[in-house]
Amino acid sequence: QVQLVQSGAEVKKPGASVKVSCKASGYAFIRYGISWVRQAPGQGLEWMGWIGANNGNTKYEQRFQGRVTMTSDTSTGTAYMDLRSLRSDDTAVYYCARDHIAVGATFFDYWGQGTLVTVSS
Amino acid sequence: DIQLTQSPSSLSASVGDRVTITCRASQPMTNYLNWYQQRPGKAPRLLIFAASTLQSGVPSRFSGSRSGADFTLTISSLQPEDVATYYCQQGYTIPPFGQGTKLDIK
């Protein structure tokens, strides 16, 4: 079955960087893109960006441009999200989600379990 | 950019009630509208895609429909396990998600 398994919780100081991994299994990794979505405590879902697993193409939400880098390793079926210059308002649960693009539809059909990133001095 | 506005932002209903959540798009769009359920402390789960197609494994009490700019998620008979926040999402522009509707049991 399709699974996305994310790396464990992180605690970082302001100004540091964090790299979250998302290991995919149960499907052909290169056939689907991966999006990253975050959720601050008590808040809604915020899309951060997308990476095409087959070619490494990326698209980032404008407010994260310059601070985020998304990569993928097709040999291990793993996607990564690197966020730099962390601030306290980056404290959130970070999710990876598989992008399903079909005729007449595009949606996130499988999600990782989430990774809590806490930014605190 | 297409903005999605969900209503209500929260609601309480009784077990067995019919529950309706609406998502209004700020611009005309086709049926690239999806619904997710997020139970407390859990990752989101896809319920409905392309406005009305039920994702595999989702109970048939969930359904989606569209009338003009309004997309609707309906739970035909509310169950205790349906306590969650529900999000709509469009596949055209950023930001893709509505602000969420929190549903609990009376």
Image: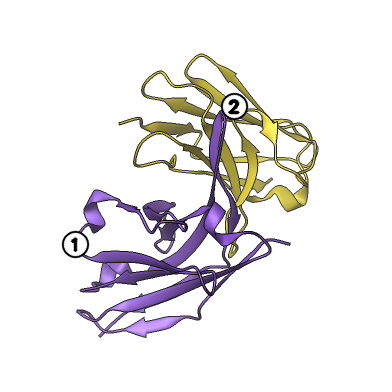
Image-based side of A84 in relation to A97, left or right? left
Total count of labels: 2
Q: Identify whether B50 is placed above or below B15.
A: above
**Picture coordinates of residue A39 (x, y %)?**
43, 60
Determine the residue positioned at 80% across, 36% down.
B60
Chain A, which colour? Answer: purple
Say what amino acid the circle numbered 1 marks: Gly
The Cα atoms of the two marked residues, 2 and 1, are separated by 37 Å
The type of residue carrying mark 2 is Thr
**SS for dot 1:** loop
Relative height, residue A19 to residue A63 (above, below): below
* Residue A22 horizontal/vertical position (percent): 51, 70
Q: In which quarter of the image is residue B77?
A: top right
Q: In this view, does B17 lie above or below B101?
A: above
- The secondary structure type at the circle numbered 2 is strand
Residue A41: give x, y in percent of width and height. Answer: 42, 64
Picture disc at residue A16: none
Query: Color of chain B here?
Result: yellow
Q: Which residue is drawn at 44% across and 42% down?
A: B97
Please name the residue shown 37% across and 21% down the image: B27
Please give the residue where the numbered disc 2 appears in the rendered image.
B72
Residue A112's spot in the image, x, y percent?
Answer: 56, 64
Chain where mark 1 sits = A
- Give the image quarter of residue A119: bottom left
In the image, farthest residue toward the top: B68
Q: In front: mark 2 or mark 1?
A: 1
Within-10-Å neighbours for mark 2: few <14, some 14–19, many 20+ = many
Label drawn at residue A66? 1
